[in-house]
């Protein structure tokens, strides 16, 4: 049954109930995110120390597919399963989704698949919200808001951005309309989940703080630099087009794999072989894994796109190819961190021709490609402020909103609904 999200009921009894529901949720989501981030770092180091692990990628894919075929159930839908449970109170999230996505994502990164971590965080948060809903026998209408809070807790903890995590959970379910009725549970869950994750000693990578001097958004006081505005707007169109191409390629490749190789295990095995072939063809392992760091200084990484020394103008293209093959074949993980890499790399490549500081366009590209692909421009603009500082907030809003408009209705999540349709 489809129905609007419930209106919040005032009163101390309802407040106590929400605190009882949110306390175990944020403890589980924050702790699981801490373990997940620690594990990602550990398996990434192991992959660099033992290059032969790449040859295990086809077997890891086959094993993951077999496990999901046997025990995945509705969890095979990934993020879409969480979104469907938010839309419809009759839909449920399998509680086993959390351990399945956690360990399958770790296996993907251990063996070199190009994937991210957002999907894992969202699915773990949604799964834990299902646990809590069953423990406390939460009513179906309240359970939908609890699932949003689980998304917020997972996203905020994994990226260390609670404001963006809360807004992401409210914005993604219905593209074009923020679900403000869930603002308080989502806000509390995102902040508390991030705090729990940090309490375990987890730190998130440092990001450069952009200042007004980096990109002269304002010129001569309060007046905007119209030439800079025009450059950012034109770049936003490119970023939005890239997001559209990526999402269409991802969905198209997934359908193509399914037609040619109906068996999920065979599909993942062949996808692993394709990743190995691409790696051998290029003669580099730079496009495996997250792309956040590498012991090899010649490898392009996300942070490297924020300085003038990067010499990989096509890194964004190859990262997109590796990610599409990995995820379309059925390996588990998220899309966001690879999209960060693609956007920052593309922004770095455009900075020279546009005559702007690379730091500014790398940040704008990182945010805009994700904003357009996830159809969550406001969450991504807030993400930019949390990662890079407040001075460039107008640029972040402009580039995220325009990129999302250019990308249109093509998005990562098939269960994401349109604002107009959601009103009916």
Image (cartoon, rainbow, N blue to C red):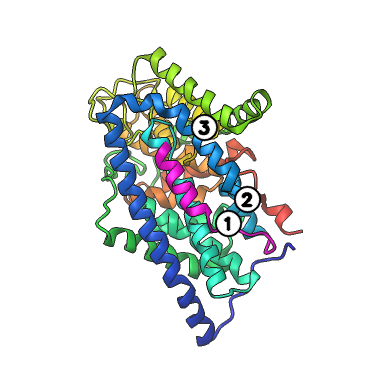
Badge 1: how crowded within 10 Å, few (<14), some, or many (20+)?
A: many
x, y percentage for residue 204? 29, 49
Magenta region: 88-107
Q: Position of residue 229 (x, y in %)?
A: 44, 38
Rendered-image quadrant of the N terminus: bottom right
**Residue located beneath label 3 in the image:** 62
Element under disc 2: helix
Q: Note whether 257 is above or below 143 in the view shown.
A: above
Q: Could you tell whether 205 is left or right of 253 in the image?
A: left
Q: CA distance from mark 2 to mark 3?
A: 19 Å
Figure quadrant of the C terminus: bottom right
Question: Can residue 357 be seen in the rendering of this structure?
Answer: no
Secondary-structure class at tag 3: helix
Q: Residue at x 61, y 31 (%)?
A: 254
Mark with earlier residue (2, 1) = 2
Q: Position of residue 332 (x, y in %)?
A: 49, 39
Q: Is residue 99 magenta?
A: yes
- Please name the residue that numbered disc 2 is placed on: 74
Residue 79: horizontal and vertical position, in percent? 56, 48
**1 or 3: tag closer to the N-terminus:** 3
The quadrant holding residue 170 is bottom right
User: For the residues carrying marks 2 and 3, which lies nearer the camera in this image?
Assistant: 3
Residue wearing tag 1: 94
Q: From this viewpoint, is residue 41 visible?
A: yes
Q: Nearer the viewer, residue 409 or 253?
A: 253
């Amino acid at each position: 049954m489809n129905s609007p999200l419930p209106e919040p009921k005032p009163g101390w009894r309802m407040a106590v109930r929400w605190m009882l529901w949110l306390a175990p949720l944020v403890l589980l989501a924050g702790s699981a995110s801490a373990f997940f981030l620690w594990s990602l770092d550990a398996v990434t180091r192991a992959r660099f120390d033992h290059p032969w692990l790449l040859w295990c990628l086809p077997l890891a894919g086959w094993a993951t597919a077999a496990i999901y075929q046997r025990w995945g159930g509705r969890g095979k839908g990934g993020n879409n399963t969480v979104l469907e449970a938010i839309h419809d109170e009759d839909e449920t999230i399998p509680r086993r989704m959390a351990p399945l996505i956690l360990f399958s994502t770790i296996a993907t990164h251990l063996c070199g698949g190009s994937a991210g971590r957002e999907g894992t965080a969202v699915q773990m948060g949604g799964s834990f919200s299902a646990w809590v809903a069953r423990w406390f026998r939460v009513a179906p209408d309240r359970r939908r808001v609890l699932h949003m809070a689980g998304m917020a807790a997972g996203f905020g903890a994994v990226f260390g951005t609670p404001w963006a995590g809360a807004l992401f959970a409210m914005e993604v379910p219905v593209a074009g309309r923020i679900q403000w009725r869930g603002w308080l549970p989502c806000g509390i869950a995102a902040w508390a989940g991030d705090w729990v994750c940090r309490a375990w000693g987890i730190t998130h990578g440092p990001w450069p703080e952009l200042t007004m001097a980096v990109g002269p958004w304002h010129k001569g006081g309060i007046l905007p630099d119209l030439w800079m505005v025009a450059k950012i707007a034109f770049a936003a169109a490119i970023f939005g087009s890239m997001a559209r191409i990526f999402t269409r390629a991802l969905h198209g490749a997934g359908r193509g794999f399914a037609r040619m190789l109906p068996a999920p295990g065979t599909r993942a095995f062949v996808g692993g072989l394709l990743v190995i072939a691409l790696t051998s063809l290029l003669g580099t392992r730079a496009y495996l894994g997250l792309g956040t760091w590498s012991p090899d200084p010649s490898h392009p990484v996300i942070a490297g796109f924020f300085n003038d020394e990067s010499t990989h103008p096509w890194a964004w293209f190859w990262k997109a190819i590796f990610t599409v093959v990995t995820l379309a074949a059925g390996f588990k993980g998220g899309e966001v961190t690879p999209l960060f890499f693609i956007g920052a790399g593309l922004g770095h490549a455009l900075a020279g021709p546009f005559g702007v500081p690379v730091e500014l366009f790398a940040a704008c590209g990182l945010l805009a490609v994700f904003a357009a692909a996830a159809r969550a421009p406001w969450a991504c603009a807030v993400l930019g402020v949390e990662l890079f500082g407040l001075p460039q907030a107008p640029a972040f809003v402009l580039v995220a909103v325009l990129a999302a408009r250019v990308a249109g209705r093509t998005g990562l999540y098939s269960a994401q609904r349109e604002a107009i349709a959601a009103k009916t």
